[in-house]
Image (cartoon, helix red, strand yellow):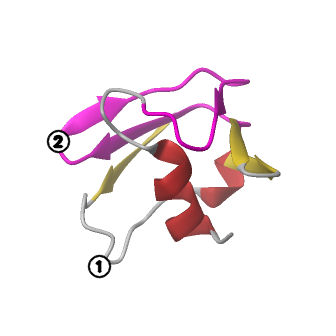
Amino acid sequence: MALFSLNSSFGQDMSIPCSAFARHYSDWEVLAPVILNIGGKLLAPTVGTTFVAGSTTNGISMSNVLDHACGR
């Protein structure tokens, strides 16, 4: 499992393991174990978790983060 730190500002370069996620229409599925630090919040989604567009997890819109970092 890898730990990745992400700056909460979309204007900054974000290092996110895009290969750990797959896009399905507007949603994102977790494919591999990962721990993310986004704006000081740790997030360790379970493999198979789907981040639905428009929803938030711990106050973070992961679909927006992934759209920005990994392409639309």
The label nearer to you, 2 versus 1, is 1
Q: Which residue is mark 1?
A: 11
> Which residue type carries mark 2?
Gly
> Which residue is farthest left?
40
- Classify mark 1: helix, strand or loop: loop
Mark found first going from the N terminus, 2 or 1: 1
Residue 7 percent across, percent down from the top left: 25, 61
Distance from the alpha carbon under mark 2 to that under mark 1: 17 Å
- 30 left or right of 13? right
Q: Is residue 39 magenta?
A: yes
Look at label 1 and name its amino acid: Gly
> Which residue is depicted at the point 51% across and 34% down?
55
Q: Is residue 17 above or below residue 40?
A: below
> Which mark, residue 59?
none
- Residue in the picture at 29% in, 46% down: 38
Q: Quick one: SS at disc 2?
A: loop
In the picture provided, is 52 more to the left or to the right than 56? right
Q: How many marks?
A: 2
For disc 2, the marked residue is 40
In the rendering, at what x and y percent does residue 40 appear?
17, 41
